Amino acid sequence: EAVLRRRADRLFSVDFRLGKELITVKHPIFTGSATAIVTPFKEGGVDLESLGNLLDFQLENGTDAIVVCGTTGEASTMTYRERAETIAFCVQHVGGRVPVIAGSGSNSTENAVTLSREAERQGADGLLVGTPYYNKATQAGLHRHYRTIADAVSLPIILYSVPSRTGVKCTAETYAALAQHPNILGVKEAGGDLALIQKTRELCPEDFYIWSGNDDETAPIMLFGGKGVISVAANVMPREMHELTAACLRGDFTAAGRMQLKLRKLCEALFWEVNPIPVKTAMSMMGFCQERFRLPMCEMEEENRARLRTVLAEYGLVS
């Protein structure tokens, strides 16, 4: 007997009953390239018109999923109401064409539960939940943090490890323990630790999925079984990031390696200053949104801005 469980009208898992034993097999919410989309601001709030144009650009160029209100979306400077409205707008505008995954992390477990439940109410297909910043929780604390959030919602959850911003990372053993939860689908790994990727793949079940959190590591992580990338660069070049991951998924790592090298200069340029300053500056140069940040994020330094424009011109993105 097989029972299908759906999340926001998308197949998430299959429960197989084998005699008295219930076996759950989870499916990836997406494979390929998901864009960690920037949040355009205007005086007084979120610029939803520009956000709609950004979403259209992504969908027209093959993006496989949208991640809204993540780190690249400057969610930490948005009010809870703004986050809810932005998620709802993305869900409505995308209209089911690709999954919409909402960032809902916090360094307070209680706040993360609130954000996660709100994202579920707004129709998100899944959640991206980062390790709690500043607190530097132990592995036991991380395990309890994530299980508490997963128990509070019915959406699939992608864990997000980015030690450069949070000061803490999960071990492969912690991932293996969390993989047993039916709502925990996998991890976006942005720690730059390929040995951890390999150990995670060895210790975790096949239905605990790994996505690259660093654009410049997409092909290597997919070589070790990763299902794609949650990408900053895809804001700027969505078609190319989609094609890179598509090559990996069909096993053509020779072509994928060439594409990864072709994108190297862009991926590097988008991190000359802290994300999302360079990528939002790039999107402004390309005419998609205002170059408006919320403090403590601020405008790019002039020297780096000039260098960034040069790189974008090399890729034919600006004149």
Image (cartoon, rainbow, N blue to C red):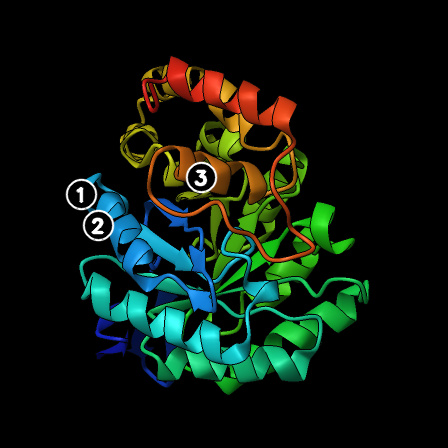
Residue 247 figure quarter? top left
Neighbours of disc 1 within 10 Å: few (<14), some (14-19), many (20+) = few
Q: Are marks 2 and 3 in contact (CB under 8 Å)?
A: no
Mark 2 vs mark 3: which is more N-terminal? 2
> From what the image shows, is residue 182 above or below residue 77?
below
Crowd band around label 3 with a 10 angstrom C-alpha radius: few (<14), some (14–19), many (20+): some
Q: Residue at x 64, y 22 (%)?
A: 303
Secondary structure category for the residue under label 3: loop
Image spot of residue 35 (x, y percent):
38, 47
Proximity of marks 1 and 2: CB atoms separated by less than 8 Å = yes
User: Disc 3 residue type?
Assistant: Gly
* Outermost front residue: 43
User: Looking at the image, is mark 3 or mark 1 nearer the viewer?
Assistant: 1
Q: Amino acid at mark 1?
A: Glu
For disc 2, the marked residue is: 56
Residue 145 quadrant: bottom right
What x and y, as percent, mark residue 54?
30, 49
Q: Which residue is mark 1?
A: 60
What element does badge 1 sit on? Answer: helix
How dense is the environment of label 2, judged by Cα within 10 Å: few (below 14), some, or many (20 and up)? few
Q: Could you say where residue 31 lies in the image, as x and y percent from the top left?
A: 32, 47
Cα–Cα span, label 1 and label 2:
6 Å
- Quadrant where the N terminus sits is bottom left
Determine whether, in the image, residue 217 is placed left or right of residue 125.
right
Specify whether 35 is left or right of 114. left
Residue wearing tag 3: 225
Which quadrant does the C terminus fall into?
top left
Secondary element under disc 2, as helix, strand or loop, is: helix
| Nearest to viewer (mark 2 / mark 3) | 2
